Structure formats: structure tokens, C-alpha cells
Amino acid sequence: MSFLDRYLGGGAFRTTLDKYLTGWSFRTTHPSFEVGEEISVFVTGYENGTAVVRVGDTVIRVPDAPDGLLDRRVRVRVTDFAENDHVGEAEYLETVGESAF
């Protein structure tokens, strides 16, 4: 039994609400990535000379990224990902955008 069935009952209100909420989902602050997956992300900082990208609270390090990419969008390929810790590593593919600001 769905949330709407339990708490709102049936009727026209439920039907209208179902139509409005169709396709909605909540995003997580800890997204997971598969090895080999290519993603487009912003470089949010550097740690000990290594570029770092963040997607929510997930942190991915990009050791082969060139310097000077802070706040720029890059495309990377995930090479390692620890789903329990929400940390990973990726290889730099290309710069695809300018500053986010």
C-alpha cells in the first residue's frame, strides 16, 4: 500500500495528486558511480595538488587533471569507487566548460 493510499485515501484528490507527482523522486546527497562511467562535473578544489570534484557529499579525486581547473566543468571517467565511503577516483578526459560563476 502506497503512502497516498494509507494517508490520503482515494478519490479525486488522490488522483490529481498522483498525476502531479508522477515521475518525482528524491535525489540523494551521496550518489554512487560505476567504474567506467563518464560524468561531467565541476572541479571544486585541490588536495595536495590533486583535483577534487564533488557531487553532493561524494568526493572523487582526479590525479591526472591539469592545474588551473578550479570551478571549471570537466568530463572524467570513474576508475575506482567505494560506495560505502562515497569516495572515488577518476581519470581526466577533457575540459568542457568555463567557470561556474
Image: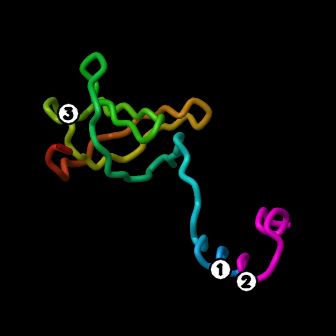
Residue type for callout 2: Ala
**Prevailing secondary structure class for the magenta stretch in the rendered image:** helix
Q: Quadrant of residue 67?
A: top left
Image quarter where the N terminus lies is: bottom right
Element marked by disc 2: helix
Label 2 near label 1: C-beta < 8 Å?
yes
Badge 3 density bin: few <14, some 14–19, many ≥20, Cα 10 Å: some
Q: State the scheme by which the image is colored.
A: rainbow
Give the Cα separation between the discs numbered 1 and 3: 45 Å
Which labelled disc corresponds to residue 16? 1
Q: Residue at x 27, y 28 (%)?
A: 45
Q: Please name the residue that numbered disc 2 is placed on.
A: 12
Mark with earlier residue (1, 3): 1
Q: Which residues are magenta?
A: 1-14
Q: Please name the residue that numbered disc 3 is placed on.
A: 70
Element marked by disc 3: loop
Residue type for callout 3: Leu
Q: Residue at x 54, y 51 (%)?
A: 27
Closer mark to the observer between disc 2 and disc 3: 2
Residue projecting furthest to the top? 48
Residue type for callout 1: Thr
Q: Residue at x 24, y 20 (%)?
A: 49
